[in-house]
Image: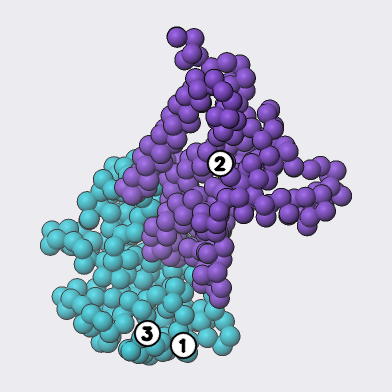
Chain colours: A purple, B cyan
Amino acid sequence: MAGDLLLTSAEWAVVGLSLKVGGVAMLVTLPIAFAIAWVLARVRFPGRVLVDALVHLPLVVPPVVTGWLLLIAFAPNGPIGGWLQDWFGVSVLFRWTGAAIAAGVMALPLMVRAMRLSIEAVDRRLESAARTLGAGPWRVFWTLTLPLSVPGVLAGAVLGFARSIGEFGATITFVSNVPGQTQTLPLAIYSALQQPGAEAMVWRLSAISVSLSLVALVASELLTRRAGRGLHVL
Amino acid sequence: MSFEIDVRKRLGEAEVALTLAAGDGATVLFGPSGVGKTSVLNMVAGLLRPDSGRILVDGETLFGDGIDVPPEARRAGYVFQEARLFPHLRVRANLLYGAGRDTAAFEDRIGFLGIGHLLDRWPRTLSGGEAQRVAIGRAVLSNPRFLLLDEPLASLDRARREEILRAIEHLRDVMRLPILMVTHDPDEAERIGTRVVRM
């Protein structure tokens, strides 16, 4: 019975792939999410509401639709897929890179939300004080806006990472369920559920999923509180 | 003339308008709250754009005639009502934020403020009077051409006010920086102002 609690090497591979997909998705999405969050927090422009809605779309659209739209865009004859094929000779279909793209798109709204709140919480009066001390807009950004919003940025990154590891619907629609390439934790659990006698595996992988999510949520909450107290993490 | 100001600015229902030409020393803008005294300082600092008019300091146009010098190039030493110290930087880094490479004269220039023992502290651990003295030091070290003081005593108790008032007199009489100061307190206006402008 004790042997049932230990992961097999195939299951370790699933965990490793999930961490890779989640990590890459989070790191690539991070600067994009921060840029969008900054624009939404600081720039008034016509159509801002629409951009806000578009960013949040993956949160409410059925994931299968998001996956299908990604498939159209990244197919070899699609607008982005064709370009990748012509210039780099690569395709992301059925590959872990595709799984990371799906995870990143699904994590984007959560990351933008957390970062936007922390950018909005930065006291603009400090920034105007810095301007009078001779700092141009870029120096103000690097020395004040960014460091003061770091706790929120980290909270968003942790949430995005956790969301990426849990991504299922868009991934299976977009890049299918390929062991070793796109079969992350939720997809492996789904496969195991369809096999008779694999309940122990479902339990083990689910326990890992729940633990990872719990750690991420606690970390994100602690960082958010830190941001609320105005403390520095740099 | 140290300051030549002729500005208009509509802010919601109210209109702020001021014309003044002031020589050396300290010019105090005196009047009740809500008449736009702080808005005038913000316009001189470049943080608020006048609807029309001109702002000259020491004969150089900062605003008007198609010129609008950005705040970072105006060399205004602005001390706000709240100290506005950067919370993620220690006192030393706050003081040096606007100082550029010119850190040699550090002790010479702000020794009179008596904040040498605070350099390694975080801003949130300072008292109101200490924070305001650091804010004055930070403005002075940014090598300003003139000073803007917005009710610098407003958040302080009586005992702390005296030390800040002495610091302002030092800026006026020893460092000889042109000062534009806002207050609603007649005693402060009387004591600091080389001239007092009612708003």
Residue at 28% over, 79% down: B28
Residue A42 falls left or right of residue A70: left
Do the dots labelled 1 and 3 sit on one chain?
yes
Q: Say which label, 1 or 3, has the lower sequence index.
A: 3
Whether residue A185 can be seen here: no
User: Which of the two residues, A186 or A80, is positioned nearer the viewer here?
Assistant: A186
Look at discs 1 and 3 and give the one toward the viewer.
3
Mark 1 secondary-structure assignment: loop
Image position of A107 with respect to A197: above or below = below
Residues at discs 1 and 3 in contact (Cβ within 8 Å): no
Q: Which x, y percent locates residue B139?
A: 39, 61
Residue that badge 1 annotates: B51
Q: Position of residue B38 (x, y in %)?
A: 32, 76
Residue B121 on image: x %, y %? 31, 42
State which quadrant residue B65 falls in: bottom right
Q: Which is more toward the observer, A52 or B193?
A: A52
What mark, if any, has residue A167 been given in the picture?
2
Label number found at residue A132: none
Label 1: chain letter: B
- Amino acid type, callout 2: Glu
Q: Residues within 10 Å of mark 3 (few under 14, many from 20)?
A: few
Give the amino acid at mark 1: Asp
Label 3 in the same subunit as label 2 = no
Q: Which of pointers 2 and 1 indicates the residue nearer the eye? A: 2
Q: Residue at x 28, y 66 (%)?
A: B81
Q: Nearer the viewer, residue B86 or A95?
A: A95
Q: Is residue A99 left or right of residue A2?
A: right
How much space separates mark 2 and mark 1, taking CA atoms? 53 Å
**Other residues around mark 1 within 10 Å, as few (<14) / some (14–19) / many (≥20):** few
Q: Residue at x 51, y 25 (%)?
A: A202
